[in-house]
Amino acid sequence: MPIQWTKKWISDETYESAGVFDVNNDGIPDIVSGAWWYQGPDFKKKHRIGDVKSVGEYHDDFSTIALDVNGDGWTDFVTGGWWGHTLRWRENPAGDPGKQWPEHIIGETGNIETTRAWDVDGDGAVELIPNTPCAQDVKVFKLIRGKNGKGTGKFEEHVIYRFPKGRTQGHGLGCGDIAGNGRMDIALCGGWLEAPKDPFKGQWKLHEDFDLGSGSVPMLIVDLNLGRNALIVGQAHRYGLDWWEQKIRNGKRTWLKHPIDPYNAQYHDLIWADIDGDGGNELVTGKRHRAHCGNEAGEWDDYGIYYFKWNGESFSKQVVCYGPIGETTGVGIHFALADLRGTGRLDIVAPGKDGLTVFFNEGS
């Protein structure tokens, strides 16, 4: 049976990114979004983080990646956006709700669509990869850790691939094992980068196998039990959500496109997680409301949040919410799944230009 959901309005703030972590170390998860953090367990009390640059309908805040950057035992977060041209982290002031969070520059990047974190080098700790559609360089930022394994507040910047003059990395980013050798390759809209044995000293190889359009961030690299990992790609600024089957014949790799949902637009953020508790992962996603402020295909359509179950051959769609603009909500550019109440079930934290909303997972 489909999951039952309880919808709770949190705020009418229009930041498009949110994360969940324990801000004040009281053992209770909090919600962090834009200039505010919302104190659990009821999220009614909100506390100021600090100013966030606004540009029209946007805020220069396109990710909320929880990470103890300076190793002080208090969780900070990583952000960055289109206009600031930098990847940044905001320092948790030891959970003090009366203090604002200092902002620190990680590195110069150019326009950031959004950023994600993956363990690129397999050392058990995540690195940061911003999607910078207009840039030639594909950059990975690695947190420098001390002998105790804790963050030092400083990062190494690695340019793992540089496109030739006149070419850029484009819109879309994923990370996972495409080659089938256990390494973390990187998917871009116009092909994928095969990881060398040492990702920060070796040479990455570009395979121009596909054109994925305005790919989502992330594009998921997942095991669908088909022998080789598949790609799941949303169209972030047009219609379409598809999975791409990887095949190798006579030493040649090809990709076969399978539609999941061709009738909805702005699938910008995707999460692969077990949301119904059956032991297998589902595709959780939805529309980024007013992704380009009402100026592209599908922006005025009815929209919502969904999860898609894999049955071994195809995906079936389950609706969390759906309706016309003003009556429903989407998932923004960086949404979150977390067990907010200690039920053992994953709830949905959905930010966006339509406000900040939580959908509590009541089970089936």
Image (tube, rainbow, N blue to C red):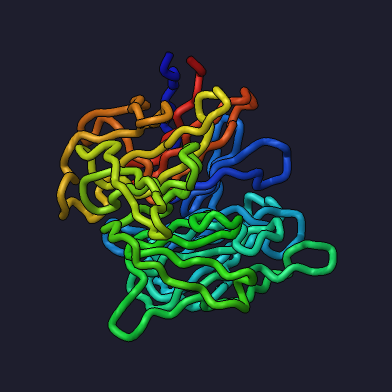
Q: Furthest residue to the front?
A: 250
Q: Is residue 332 visible?
A: no
- The residue under the point 40% across, 67% down is 207
Image label count: 0
Q: Is residue 79 visible?
A: yes
Q: Furthest residue to the right?
A: 148
The quadrant of the rendering that contains the N terminus is top left
In the rendered view, tell whether residue 28 sits above or below residue 34.
above
**Based on the displayed image, in which of its 4 quarters is residue 304 positioned?**
top left
- Image location of residue 230, percent across then percent down: 43, 46
- Image location of residue 213, percent across then percent down: 26, 58
Asked if residue 8 lies left or right of residue 160, the reply is: left
**Based on the displayed image, in which of its 4 quarters is residue 165 positioned?**
bottom left
In the rendered view, tell whether residue 237 sits above or below residue 108.
above
- Image location of residue 359, percent across then percent down: 45, 29
- The residue under the point 33% across, 67% down is 170
- Image location of residue 306, percent across then percent down: 36, 31
Task: Report the front residue among 312 and 299.
Answer: 312
Task: Report the front residue among 209 and 132.
Answer: 209
